[in-house]
Image: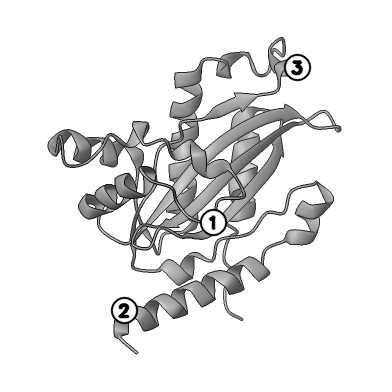
Amino acid sequence: MPADRARRVVLLALLTIGTSLAPVSRAVAQGTDTKALLASALAGESIPLLPLTLAAADPALTADSTFAPYRERRRTLAWADSIIGESFESRAPEVTWVLPAALRRLARRNPGMMPEPDHLGQAVLASPKLKRVPDPLRTSLRQVTAFSGGRFAMVPAALSFTRDTSGALRAELSLVLADTRNGSVAWRTLAWGLGATPPEALTAALALVLPAEIPPQ
């Protein structure tokens, strides 16, 4: 078996194992099956972490004073990108994550060859029925990885907020790991988290999908 193919088989097997180890029971009780990412399966990889382009809130939050600072779309996307990037870098340091700011710089340096990362149409991947990345998004992701390095792309596809029955804010973040070579969805999850503020809820959601590793005994 060629080395690249063998490595791919091992990587996908580890991702599957990571899915089975996720704290699913608690998530199911909340109506969302969150699957943890086993980042060690991607150790040594360079993976672009695309910017978030879709953020929405329950209409009931429009008059909510807690949510007031986050009603402006650009501001919401900016702080969400910051929290997502910091969480991936701190909780999965074995992977080289190429964050949105770096991707934008690459696009500016390579006009016409690398597409703008904020305008790829990546929100389409929020659909749980998609098993493959549709074109032209697949082509765009391949162009991105051609400059950022690596084979996979991590896509925060959509972020939403609502008020939980307990009164806390609930964040739900759709995440997709796309294989840019064959166009398959290698992994996806809908992470959820509760908090007093949107940043707290999003941070809690990311902690669920990127659990801290347990040191060996």
In which quadrant is the N terminus drawn?
bottom left
Q: In this view, does 158 lie to the left or right of 139?
A: right
Q: Earlier in the sequence, mark 2 or mark 1?
A: 2
Given this view, does label 2 or label 3 mark the residue nearer the observer?
Answer: 2
Label 3 packing within 10 angstroms: few (<14), some (14-19), many (20+): few
Horizontal placement of 96 versus 90: left or right? Answer: left
Q: What element carries label 1?
A: loop
Q: Is mark 2 on a helix, strand or loop?
A: helix
* Label 2 vs label 1, nearer the camera: 1
According to the picture, the residue beneath numbered tag 3 turns out to be 60
Q: Where is the C terminus found, in terms of image quarters? A: bottom right
Residue at 52%, 15% (x, y): give it.
72
**Residue 116 location, quadrant:** top left
Residue 109 at x, y percent in the picture: 13, 37
> Which residue is labeled 1 in the image?
131
State the CA–CA distance, disc 2 to disc 1. Answer: 22 Å
Between disc 3 and disc 1, whose residue precedes? 3
What is the three-letter code of the residue carrying label 3?
Answer: Ala
Type of amino acid under label 2: Asp
Measuring from the top left, give residue 199's x and y in whole percent.
59, 32
Residue drawn at the location 32% of the way across and 37% of the way down? 117
| Residue 50 against residue 34 in the figure, above or below | above
User: Residue 140 shows which numbered tag?
Assistant: none
Circle 2 is placed at which residue position? Answer: 4
State the separation of the CA atoms marked 2 and 3: 50 Å
Is 183 placed above or below 165 here? below
In the depicted structure, whether residue 100 falls above or below residue 142? above
